[in-house]
């Protein structure tokens, strides 16, 4: 292969790679449930949250608590509205507990007891295949 032939081949190969990357980005944008179409972010794989259990995961600079209940997933802020403590899911009681001041929230984020004066913000959550996607309301 001549030097000119090699350079032409290299330019064509780089153009093909660039085209594929652009196409992949376009497909990711158009696919439902992927960030960009409704602002969702994949926070976990569904298998990471067994039924009845919950997981705390990072979400846009904060923490979200994703709870798996039967066929559905619920996503709420993972930080207490009283003083920002990290919340945990009590599977036996079916409640969200704040260990700092013993605040208690129900599955909808409503305050059950404790010092928190505001309910937990809810987020949108959707299972797409094996992925859990979360978005702001
Ligand atoms: S920080 Fe949660 S009840 Fe005070």
Image (spheres, helix red, strand yellow):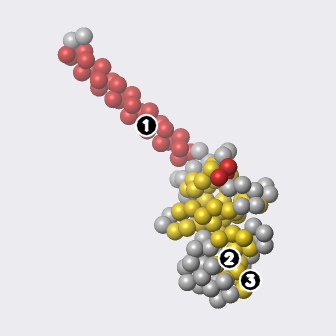
Q: Circle 1 sits in a helix, a strand or a loop, which is it?
A: helix
- Residue farthest toward the left in the current orientation of the protein: 3
Q: Circle 2 sits in a helix, a strand or a loop, which is it?
A: strand
Asked if 68 appears above or below 94 in the picture, the reply is above
Closer-to-camera residue (51/130): 51
Residue beneath the point at 66% across and 46% down: 130
Would residue 29 be visible to someone looking at this image?
yes
In this rendering, the label closer to the viewer, 3 or 1: 3
Asked if 63 appears above or below 110 in the picture, the reply is above
User: Disc number at residue 97?
Assistant: 2
Give the image location of residue 84, x and y in percent.
55, 79
Task: Kindly indicate whether the residue at mark 2 contacts the one at mark 1 (C-beta within 8 angstroms).
Answer: no
Residue beneath the point at 62% across and 85% down: 101
Locate residue 85: give its quadrant: bottom right
Locate residue 93: give its quadrant: bottom right
Q: Determine whether the beta carbon of the residue marked 3 sits less than 8 angstroms from the nearest atom of ligand 1.
A: no
Give the image location of residue 74, x and y in percent.
70, 63
Cα distance between the residues tagged 3 and 1: 50 Å
Q: Judge from the rendering whether residue 73 lies leftward or rightward of residue 35; answer left or right.
A: right
Q: Mark 1 points at which residue?
A: 21
Task: Decide which of tag 3 and tag 2 comes sooner along the chain.
Answer: 2
Task: Decide which of tag 1 and tag 2 comes sooner along the chain.
Answer: 1
User: Disc number at residue 112?
Assistant: 3
- Residue farthest toward the top in the current orientation of the protein: 1
């Amino acid at each position: 292969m001549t030097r000119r032939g090699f350079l032409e081949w290299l330019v064509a190969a780089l153009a093909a790679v660039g085209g594929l990357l652009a196409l992949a980005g376009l497909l990711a944008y158009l696919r439902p449930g992927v960030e960009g179409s409704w602002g969702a972010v994949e926070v976990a794989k569904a298998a990471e949250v067994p039924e009845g259990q919950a997981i705390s995961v990072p979400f846009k600079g904060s923490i979200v608590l994703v709870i798996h209940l039967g066929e559905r997933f619920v996503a709420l802020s993972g930080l207490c509205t009283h003083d920002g403590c990290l919340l945990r899911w009590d599977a036996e009681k079916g409640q969200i507990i704040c260990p700092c001041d013993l605040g208690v929230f129900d599955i909808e984020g409503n305050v059950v007891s404790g010092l928190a004066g505001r309910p937990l913000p809810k987020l949108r959550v959707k299972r797409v295949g094996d992925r859990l996607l979360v978005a702001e309301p």
